[in-house]
Amino acid sequence: MERAEIKSLLEIIDQQVSSSILGGMEEQYEELETLGYVRINREAVQWSSSITPEGMHFLHTYE
C-alpha cells in the first residue's frame, strides 16, 4: 500500500473515530493493523477499526 493510500484511510478512520470495515477492504485494514496504525475489533458482528497512537503519528507527520 502506498503512503498516500495509507494516509487517506487513516484520515477516514480518524474522522469517524471508529471505522466500519466494508466488504472488500479487509486486506487494506489488516495491512494497517500489521503496520501498527489501527486496531481491528473483530468481536463485533461488523468489524471496525480505530486509529492507534502510531497511526496518529504517521497521519500528522506525512506530507
Image (tube, grey):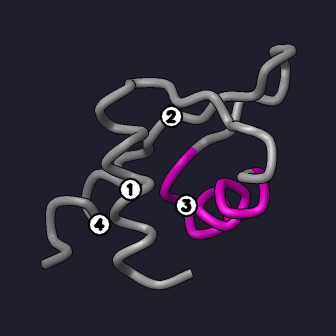
Type of the residue with mark 1: Gly
- Answer with mark 4 or mark 3, whichever residue precedes in sequence: 3
Residue at image mark 1: 55
- Answer with mark 1 or mark 2, whichever residue precedes in sequence: 2
Label drawn at residue 36: 3
State yes or no: discs 4 and 1 in contact (Cβ < 8 Å): yes
- Marks counted in the figure total 4
- Answer with mark 3 or mark 2, whichever residue precedes in sequence: 3
Q: Is residue 44 left or right of residue 63?
A: right
Kindly identify the residue that appears in the image at 61 percent across and 42 percent down.
39
The front one of 63 and 54 is 63
Kindly identify the residue that appears in the image at 29 percent across and 32 percent down.
15
The front one of 51 and 2 is 2
Kindly identify the residue that appears in the image at 51 percent across and 34 percent down.
50
State yes or no: discs 4 and 2 in contact (Cβ < 8 Å): no
Label drawn at residue 30: none
Few, some or many residues within 10 Å of mark 4 (<14, 14–19, 20+)? some
Few, some or many residues within 10 Å of mark 2 (<14, 14–19, 20+)? some
